[in-house]
Amino acid sequence: MNNIKMFLVRYAEIGTKGKNRYVFEDVLCKRIRNRLKPLGEFDVRRDFGRIYIEALSDYDYDEAVEKLTKIFGIVGLCPVTVAEEFTYESISKAAIEHFEETFGDSADNPYDSYNFSFKVHTRRVNKNFPMNSMEVDMEIGHDLLEKFENEGLHVDVHKPDIMVEVELRGEQGYVYSKIIPGPGGLPVGTNGKAMSLLSGGIDSPVATYMVAKRGVEMEAVYFNSPPYTSQRALEKVEKLGTIVAQYSGPIKLHIVNFTDIQLAIYDNCPHDQLTIIMKRYFFRVAEELAKRNDCQAVITGESIGQVSSQTMQSLAVIDNAVDIPVFRPVIGMDKQEIVEYSQEIGTFETSIEPYEDCCTIFVDKHPVTKPKLFSIEKSEHRLEGIIEPLVEKAIETAEVVILK
Ligand code: ATP
Ligand code: MG
């Protein structure tokens, strides 16, 4: 498909934002430019409610599609064949080339060669074109039939398999027919920033993806407990963050050494409350990091009832540790649903690699499932004077890596 020199970007939701629409479109254009930069030279422009991407140099079509279909805000991507001249003959030639390119021997043609129905739909934005849109519809339809009828092509004006779109805009004729689905959502950077608690499990990468999909820029924090957790466990988290970053854009990951805090909790608090208290300290550290990095919320991969620390009572007690809003996008999803989601975005295979995480190492055989806030607070009193410098040190010594 390397004769394709242009893409038309379809976006849905950002088209509904009224006056803000331009802001959203500009951010989307910027995301597209950044993502395509390593692949060649492209002109990305906005034109009356549409975004066009034009290749100005050679590029790898498959690579470009791969990158573009991971940009939030893009609902669909149409490869466009551009007519050489703004004349009917040239546009007709482009339509035939477009068909050959798209359906000829293309591996992703779902039809048996040209054995499908079609209809031509023309948009004549430039009214100076000498034929009206119905005439263009009919003539292009005729030319395509003449060329491909023997190979099964036929017209169906009511329910065509393929809509052939012809656009006459400015001094240019465009032909496109295929929509490659994008991820939808809103362009990252249009909705503030959040700090995600990213572990090596299945849930938190999905949660991070879901929030980024709503246009939120993501940072992440991982609580590392060496030597109880390994370098491999950290690398797994980095790998997961990198997969999510292919969609969200670069993720600043804060790696917090949590060992001393965890040991202090272990030495001073009832063991059936360890997980809850540890989570409260996760949240406290995450809240502080969020504030220092202009994040407006904390994100986790918790889902009601999945484990003892995710009962409603536990979640309420954990939330109580901080003032910052905590959002849990997978809260109402079943494990199987989260698994399917992670398979779709490509994190699943990495998530199931068997590296220990710090929650499992210090976990009690019989953790509380309905913790009472006063009882947890009472236990935390025993940490007074011991834990504050440890928390401070954990925050100050956090390492930062940019995942992209
Ligand atoms: P996940 O699949 O995301 O690891 P989980 O089912 O293992 O979740 P928990 O271990 O209870 O559940 O963790 C709940 C949430 O707490 C995680 O989704 C994640 O957001 C956060 N979390 C857990 N461990 C860590 C860690 N070591 N560093 C950062 N965040 C963590
Ligand atoms: Mg986990």
Image (tube, helix red, strand yellow):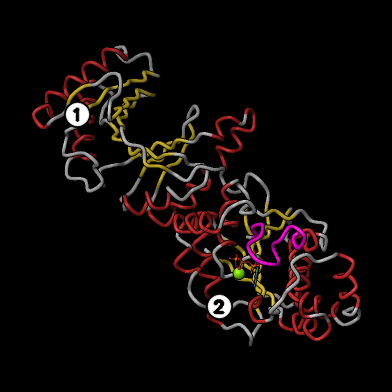
Q: Nearer the viewer, residue 139 or 215?
A: 215
Would the CB of label 2 be found within 8 Å of ligand 1? no
Q: What's the residue type where badge 1 is placed? A: Lys
Q: Residue at x 56, y 45 (%)?
A: 187
* Mark toward the start of the polypeptide (1 vs 2): 1
Q: Quadrant of residue 99?
A: top left
Whether residue 183 sits left or right of residue 378 in the image: it is left
Q: Does the magenta portion include 314?
A: yes
Q: Position of residue 11 (x, y in %)?
A: 49, 36
In the depicted view, which residue is nearer to us: 30 or 224?
224
| Element carrying mark 1 | helix
Mark 2 lies on residue: 233
Nearest the eye: 278 or 80: 278
Q: Is residue 383 left or right of residue 133?
A: right
Query: Would residue 320 be counted in the magenta stretch?
Result: no
Give the CA distance from mark 1 to mark 2. Answer: 56 Å
The part of the chain drawn in magenta is 302-315
Relative image position of residue 152 (x, y in whole percent):
13, 30
Q: Residue at x 12, y 23 (%)?
A: 146
For image coordinates 63% across by 87% down, the residue present is 227
Amino acid marked by disc 2: Ala
Residue on which disc 1 sits: 93
In the image, residue 304 above or below residue 120: below
